[in-house]
Every structure is written in structure tokens, then in C-alpha cells.
Amino acid sequence: MAGIATLMATLVLGVVLGLVLRRRDGRMRVVEHAPVTSGDLGADLGERATLVQFSTAFCQPCRATRRILGEVAGMVPGVRHVEIDAESRLDLVRRFDVLRTPTVLVLDGAGNVVKRASGQPRKADVIVALGAAVDGASHGPSQPSDKV
Amino acid sequence: MQIDPRGPRFGAAVTSVVLAVVLVTQNPWLLAAQAIVFALGAADASPYGLVFRRFVRPRLGPPAETEDAAPPRFAQAVGLGFAMVGLIGFAAGITALALGATAAALLAAFLNAAFGFCLGCETYLLIRRLQPGRIQ
């Protein structure tokens, strides 16, 4: 009896969790983080924007994410894709509270974190987030009200 | 190594059914058998994978894309961990532990089978985060 109840509860939890994950996976969210420097990343920032991807060796969607971000960075001038091995940069993982891979941070030209996504983002969402990053940077710090 | 991603998903579906039967029957031998399957899967020799390649794959078209073999293999090792805890629960007569650990493994297998989401893979970074920091 306890076994059947456990089975039912597990399946219900699985369906709910699966639907929530499917909905939230890869969604670009607005976040508050301190600005990131090239020294932090150990890589140059893009002139206009940087797509920072946290990956691990045991991450299924990281490869597809790498492809998407690489394509977008190749498409838009002044945008760089920087992939970080989460395991060897636990300092950054803790600083940005990365719980899952891939986690993607979208930085503007000044290194401000404009958007963030956990899970594989869709290409269209990356392009929209990038638009926000490039716009925000071009207005400069004199108009901070422009930022969402 | 690159593999057909439908292989691990097929394996997860079979695993889900087996673990569901373990919960209902509370049969430790069936869980022990699944633990052996997890161990073989972690060593890249999953019998479910063999069934997939021998009987299922030939009936399907080629995969849209391949994926790395390491993440699902790691997830099998995580599954083995939960199966071992479940077996300890059965052996010690702690039914709640046995059912809880089996349910956790079932949840991961079900999410993989139904949604293609690898819960076991996600534990990797969480485990590494618990360890002391190391800078490049």
C-alpha cells in the first residue's frame, strides 16, 4: 500500500516538475549581479556584448547551447561567446550562484549582467536578450532608467 | 564518444517501469537487478542500451543529432547510488528508506524518459559545489 502511494506521488511530482522545467528551461530573466570584468572571466569581453556560458563535462544540453551561442556571436559583430568550465571556476559558480548547466549570462559592453538563463536557451531569446544588452550599453550610464 | 540520444531515453523508460514495479511489489531482488543494470550502464555496457541497438534502433530512422555519452553514463552512476541506498533500506528493514531512495531514482528516470531531462546530470555541479573551491 505504501509502495503504491509512493509510486503515485512520485509520478505526480515527476509530471509537475517536468512541466515546470520545460516552461522555465532556457528562459531569459532579468537579474541583479555586480559587473563582470575580463579578469573575472579570464577572457576578453566582447566590445558590445558577451555571452557567458557555464558548462560541465556531464551536461547534455551544453553542446547545443555552445552551438547556438557560437552562431549568434558569429552573426553579430562585437559579440563574444565565452564558455566557462564550471568545475574549474567554482569561485564564479558560487559568485553567480550557478546551480545548473548550462547557465548563460548576457553581458553588455561594460560587463553588466543584463539577462540570465538556466538550461538551453532558444536562439530567438538569445538574440532578443542581446538586443537589450547592446541597446543598454549604447545609451550609456547617463540613462540608467532605460534598463528594465 | 557520440551516441543516439534515444538510447538513454529508451533505457530510462524501461528503468521507470522496473522501479515502479519495485515500489509496488517491494521486491529487493528486482531492485538489485536494476542496480546491476545501473552499474553496467555506468561502465557503458547497459543491457537496455543493447536491446535498443539490437531491436529498437533498426526500426527507427537515423537520429536528428547525436550526443555525448558521458552525461548519461554519469547519470547511471547516480542511479546506482540511489539503488544501493534502497537496497540498504530493504536489508535493514527500513521500508521508508528503501521506498524513498527507489522513488528518487524513479523520479530521475521518469523525467528523462518523459521530458528528456537528465536529473542525474544536474547533480554533478551540485556535488562539486559542496567541495572546497579551487581556482583554475
Image (cartoon, coloured by chain):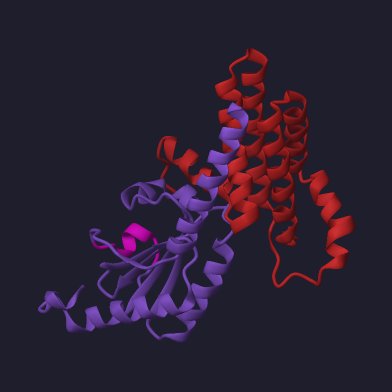
Chain colours: A purple, B red
Q: Nearer the viewer, residue A28 or A50?
A: A28
A14 lies left or right of B42: left
Query: Any magenta on residue A69?
Result: no
Q: Nearer the viewer, residue B121 or B57?
A: B57
A78 lies left or right of A110: right
Which residue is located at x 59 percent, y 58 percent?
B115
Residue B38 drawn above or below residue A92: above
Which residue is located at x 66 percent, y 27 percent?
B84
Which residue is located at x 58 percent, y 17 percent?
B94
The stretch in magenta equals: A35-43
Q: Residue furthest front?
A: A1
Residue B66 pos. (x, y %):
71, 66
Which residue is located at x 66 percent, y 50 percent?
B72
Residue B112 drawn above or below residue A37: above
Residue A105 drawn above or below residue A74: above
Q: Residue furthest top?
A: B92
Residue B48 pos. (x, y %):
80, 47
